[in-house]
Amino acid sequence: MSKFQNKYRIESARLPKYDYSNPNWYYVTINTKNHIYWFGDIKNGKMILNDLGKIVEQEWLKTAIIKKKC
């Protein structure tokens, strides 16, 4: 039995019948506890990454390389 018993389950935001395996741009939104800006700040509508944010960006970009190797 699930620890949370579907208490925190939300409906999917995915488009029905859309093929997400197609190469395209996708956005990931991360909401952190207490809304702490762990990865940087937004200034003039642009994300300014801090050191941790830069590490996350580098690792995220590696996923395309890893995927090509599979």
Image (cartoon, rainbow, N blue to C red):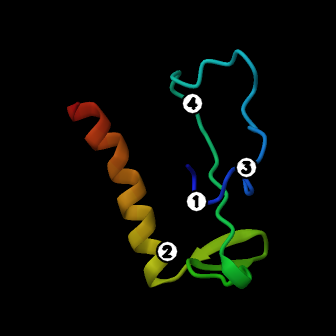
Q: Could you say which disc has been placed on residue 24 in the image? A: 4
- Please tell me which of labels 2 and 3 falls first in the chain: 3
Residue placed under numbered mark 3 in the picture: 9
User: What is the CA distance from the residue labelled 1 to the residue labelled 3?
Assistant: 12 Å
User: What is the CA distance from the residue labelled 4 to the residue labelled 3?
Assistant: 27 Å
Residue 61 percent location from the top left of the image: 39, 52
- Please tell me which of labels 4 and 2 falls first in the chain: 4
Viewer-nearest of discs 2 and 3: 3
Residue placed under numbered mark 2 in the picture: 53
User: What is the CA distance from the residue labelled 4 to the residue labelled 2?
Assistant: 22 Å
Q: Quadrant of residue 14?
A: top right
Q: Amino acid at mark 2?
A: Gly
Q: Amino acid at mark 4?
A: Asn
- Please tell me which of labels 1 and 2 falls first in the chain: 1
Name, please, the residue furthest toward the front. 1
Q: Amino acid at mark 1?
A: Lys
Viewer-nearest of discs 4 and 1: 1
User: What is the CA distance from the residue labelled 2 to the residue labelled 3?
Assistant: 28 Å
Residue 49 percent location from the top left of the image: 54, 76
Q: Badge 1: few (under 14), some or many (20 or more) residues near its Cα, within 10 Å? A: few
Please determine whether, in this image, residue 35 is positioned above or below residue 5: below
Q: Secondary structure at mark 3?
A: loop
Q: Badge 3: few (under 14), some or many (20 or more) residues near its Cα, within 10 Å? A: few
Residue placed under numbered mark 1 in the picture: 3
